[in-house]
Amino acid sequence: MKRLLITLLVLSMTTPAAAAESDLARTGQDLREHPDTELEFDGYFRTRGEAFFNLDLDRGPTPSGQYLYPLPLGNPRSQWLTGADMRLRTDLSLYALNGTAAVKVRIDVLDNLPFGSTPNGNPLTTTSQNSPGTAFQLKRAYGEVLTPFGVLLAGRMGAHWGLGMLANGGDCASCDTGDAADRVAFISPIAGHLWAAAYDIAYAGPTTSRTLEDRALDLDPSDDVHAITFASMRWRSPLARERRLRADMATIDYGGTFSYRWQQNDVPASWLDTNEDVELDPRQVMERDFRSWVFDGWMRVLHPWMRLEFEAAYLIAEIGQPSSIPGFQLNEPITSQQYGFAFESDFGPWDGDFTGGLDAGVASGDSAPGFGSTLGLEGDQPVAGDLDGPQANPPRDNQINNFLFHPDYHVDRILFREIIGTVTDAMYLRPHVAWRFAELGPGSFTASMAATASWAVNVQSTPGNAKHLGVELDPSLLYRHEDGFSLSVDYAVLFPGKGLSNPDLELSATPAQLFRARVIYGF
């Protein structure tokens, strides 16, 4: 039974159907009268190369034989790993003649495709690269229409809220994933606020072909995962914010969202990885009785000399029947209470060359061993000293309380982004400075430095059975051209704390380093 724990609880709660500070506020802003039917293109081409030194921290394996990071295949005692990838992102917007309707599409091409992959033939003699089978990925496709009462949206669209700590659309140039929702939503301006309501179908269960072979039919509506969301926001456009800054005025924007998600029944055979195909029949339908509630608040204070912004979330959930085996019932539900908080600040003149600030965050934890950042449906139960593993173990442990920051909300470059996978069961402080020290024609050079100190919330979750996780330094040098081109060189060094050491083998964790170069061509 240890290998059959359901993690639907956390997986479903990491992508709530929340309207976004960016999505909610920008929706409908570009609907205007056009002289003709118009097609607009936006996007970028990104390439980046990275080198990793000693990300396993030379502290040996955990009690379950896990290493904190992959080791070189040919020589596990070697310290270096490398990688390079690319992505072409294209956002297309097709506007109707009268300007009241638009269709929008996001297509990613060669999405995070590694350099040197898909060689044409023998690697020694290849002279070309084959196109991968998933070269084109349709990420979003939805429509907007302006009505007398607001904007109506329908389709698969991005989902982003606030700072992106909980729901993140993955729009940043360094983002790797991003949330999208199959949704029908309505947004209306009332009393100086934006008000939104949305209905999502996150999962439709197994389907079959209808009489028309190219259309699908949901075999059991009771296994659908539904979500409803309500959100409200006070928001001003970037142009309005700039006008107020020039007038030496402060601007306060804020918002709140609530989401309820549920599933009555489930057909695990339709989504579980199994060695053999399972015939779907009524015996495969089982009760799930899942429901979750998400509360999230966001606020931003913008002043000519500072920016203060925070987001706080509280999540409650319950899986009435956590078993994934039809006919095998577990008597106790799995429950969860999670909280997360992120704070960002910048101090300095809004149009100046120097800024500094302090960021901070906390994500609730769970007393089970490991951080629980990459939960697998059939993962082995962790033991004390492991880095990761499922956070519930029915019937002895029926709680999953570790909050997960969205992986596209980047705090650092090594510890949370690479080794742990995201911020969970942890707290951090992050002072940072940035200096735009030179201009070259239509471009500028900026140097920045951030230092992130982090601690575990639950000491039982750490491999070293200690709270201090370490201190990381992240300097960068960036050149940005006003036409959308940018070149950045990043470095990072992690000085690990005792929470990442190996007390069983009496080995202390040693520093890790990262080198990265990134080129972005915007259009």
Image (spheres, grey):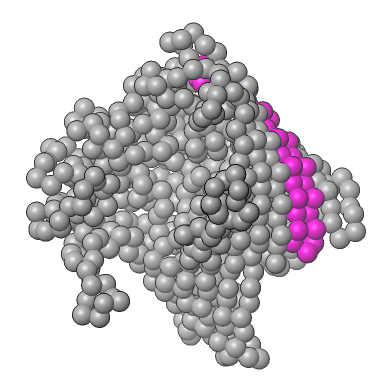
Considering the image in quadrants, where does the N terminus appear?
top left
Position of 292 relative to 401 (above/below): below
Q: Main secondary structure of the magenta part?
A: strand
> Where in the figure is residue 4, as x and y percent of width and height?
23, 38
Q: Is residue 216 above or below residue 53?
A: below
Give me the residue at 49% from left, 46% from top.
406
52 to 261, vertically: above or below: above
The stretch drawn in magenta includes residue 302: no
Answer with left or right where residue 507 lies relative to residue 304: left
Q: Is residue 41 above or below residue 242?
A: below
Instruction: Name the quadrant containing residue 77.
Output: top right
Residues 271 and 318: in front is 271
Left or right of 34? Residue 465 is left
Q: Is residue 486 visible?
A: yes
Most distant residue in the front direction: 125
Q: Position of residue 395 (x, y in %)?
A: 18, 31
Q: Viewer-proximal residue, 360 or 212?
A: 212
Q: Is residue 345 visible?
A: no
Q: Nearer the viewer, residue 129 or 521?
A: 129
Q: Is residue 491 magenta?
A: yes
Magenta extent: 472-501
Q: Nearer the viewer, residue 133 or 68?
A: 133
Q: Residue 496: image x %, image y %?
A: 58, 21
The reply, left or right, for residue 113 in relation to residue 369 is right
Give me the residue at 31% from left, 34% from top. Answer: 379
- Where is the C terminus found, in terms of image quarters? bottom right
In x, y percent, where is residue 156?
A: 43, 68
- Report the residue at 63% width, 77% height from top: 40
> Count of labels shown?
0
- What residue appears at the point 51 percent right and 64 percent down from the top-left corner? 136
